[in-house]
Image (tube, grey):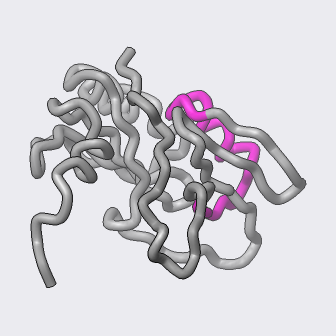
Amino acid sequence: MIEIADPIFKPDNQNAVVKPLLMTHGTMESRNLTETRKFLEEFLGMECVRHNPDGMHVRCGMKFSIVCLQTDTPMNKLTMLNHWGLDVATKEEVDDAYKAAIEMKDKYKIRSITEPVMRHGIYSFYLEDLDGNFWEIEYYDGGSVHEDAFDFGDRYEE
């Protein structure tokens, strides 16, 4: 298993108006928390805790969680550009996850699945879950996309 070295760091924000310690969470919507939790835990390997009747926290590997809120109102329409990325340890794990997604599409109510491709140095595929959220299952040969993105720094100026 690949581990992220030092998943917590001191932010360089002393000149900012707000000086947060860390980014703690984001949000996504769910039509049915019970079904969503089953998909998140059983298929994606996430850890979930239900903290109220209409919400739960979801996390994996870092001190950041997604607050998943159940809603009865029409949900926001998302596209693949609005996705959550999950790193796996090998290219073969991407292929295995892709095959599993195809095989278990009906069981977990997966709406759509793209084929794995190599794109911008990352081998990955996307799937759309039962709530219309997109997930990218990805392998990056450099170790951690997250680490390299910030280690490389800005590459484009405005």
For image coordinates 24% across by 33% down, the residue present is 139
| 31 horizontally vs 87: left or right | right
Q: Where's the C terminus, which quadrant?
A: bottom left
Q: Is residue 110 left or right of residue 157?
A: right
Outermost residue, right side: 53
Image spot of residue 64 (x, y percent):
58, 48
Magenta extent? 26-46
The residue shown at (28%, 36%) is 144
Instruction: Give the x, y percent position of residue 98.
Output: 31, 32
Residue most extreme to the top: 1
Estimate the x, y position of residue 123 in percent, counting from the top left: 17, 38
**Total labels drawn:** 0
Q: Quadrant of the N terminus?
A: top left
Question: Which of 38 and 122 lies nearest the eye of the viewer?
Answer: 122
Is 131 located above or below residue 97 in the figure? Answer: below
Q: Residue furthest front?
A: 14
Does residue 128 appear to the left or right of 113 in the view shown?
Answer: right
> Residue at coordinates 70% horizontally, 38% vertically from top-left?
48
Whether residue 60 sits left or right of residue 4 in the image: it is right
| Up-down relation of residue 13 to residue 9 (above or below) | below
Q: Position of residue 124 (x, y in %)?
A: 23, 41
Is 136 in the magenta? no
- Decide: is 87 above or below 66: above
Residue 33 belongs to magenta span: yes
